[in-house]
Each structure stands twice: as C-alpha cells, then as structure tokens.
Amino acid sequence: MPESEAITSAARSPATAVPIGAPRGRGKRLPSTLARLATRDRLVRQWRDAFLSDASALAAAETIARELTRYRAAAWTRERTADECPQRHRGRPAELAWCVLKVCDRDLSARHIRRIIAT
C-alpha cells in the first residue's frame, strides 16, 4: 500500500465507534476518543518526519500549526465531506492536514503540537 493510501486509511479508521460499557463520567474519556487522539498525534509526528525533519521542534510545531490553521480556514471548508483526501493533495503537507482534521476537526496550537512531537 503506498504511503498516501496508508495515511488516508488511517484517517478513516473505525476509531469513532463507541464501545458498549464505555466509562462515563467526569474526567473519563471514551476509548474511541483516546483512539482518535492517538491517531491524530501519530499523523502529526508523521507530518514532522516527512516534511520538517531538519527543523527544530519549535519551528516544526509553529509551521504545522500555521499550515493546519490555514488549511482548516480555506480548503477544509470545501473538502471536509470527502471520504478520501483529494488527489491534488497527495504527497504534500495538505494531505496530512486533511487526515489530521478528518480524525479530529480542531485547531492545534504550536505549544500543543510541540508536546505531541516530543512524545
């Protein structure tokens, strides 16, 4: 499986299914939420390794946060309903931005991305 297909399939994983008997209550995250966050974090690390391996952790985090915010404000508004990443983004940082947002549609601060990269 080519890398682009592996990235896209990770974004479409069935991690959003809520298991029966999942813990509920204050401070308890559902296993599906934990799985989605783990997938998002793995994609952010993959983004850094693939496109920003020479940059420092701070510079990489700031770049990822900026590109993710820019993509979310522009192209994501049109592409969020797509089942697969648009072909024009394949092999580019926008592909990973699409995958990250498909898993968890939230902006990430540079500080939070730095924490993700560090682990």
Image (tube, helix red, strand yellow):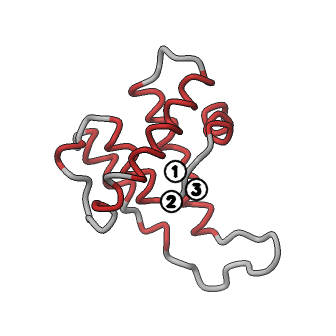
Extreme residue toward the top, this view: 54
Q: CA distance from mark 2 to mark 3?
A: 7 Å
The Cα–Cα distance between marks 1 and 2, rounded to whole angstroms, is 7 Å
Query: Where residue 105 sits in the image (x, y, percent)?
Result: 49, 60
Residue at image mark 2: 104
Viewer-side label of 2, 3: 2
Q: Are dots 1 and 2 in contact, CB under 8 Å? A: yes
Disc 2 residue type (three-letter): Cys
Instruction: Kindly indicate whether the residue at mark 3 contacts the one at mark 1 (C-beta within 8 angstroms).
Output: yes
For disc 1, the marked residue is: 40
Do the residues bearing badges 2 and 3 touch, measured as CB atoms within 8 Å? Answer: yes
Direction right: furthest residue = 26
Mark 1 or mark 2, earlier in chain: 1
Residue 65 location, x and y as percent?
Answer: 53, 39
Residue 37 has which mark? 3
Task: State the SS at label 3.
Answer: helix
User: Which type of secondary structure does the marked residue at label 2 adopt?
Assistant: loop
Q: Is residue 44 above or below residue 104?
A: above
Horizontal arrangement in the rendering, residue 7 relative to residue 39 (left or right)? left
Q: Residues within 10 Å of mark 1 (few under 14, many from 20)?
A: many
* Residue 81 horizontal side relative to residue 40, left or right: left
Residue 66 on image: x %, y %: 50, 37
- The quarter of the picture where residue 106 lies is bottom right
Q: Position of residue 107 (x, y in %)?
A: 55, 52
**Above/below status of 60 relative to 13:** above
> Residue at 63% of width from left, 68% of height from top?
31
- Secondary structure under badge 1? helix
Depth check, front residue: 37 or 101? 101
Task: Give how far apart the Cα atoms at labels 1 and 3 are.
Answer: 5 Å
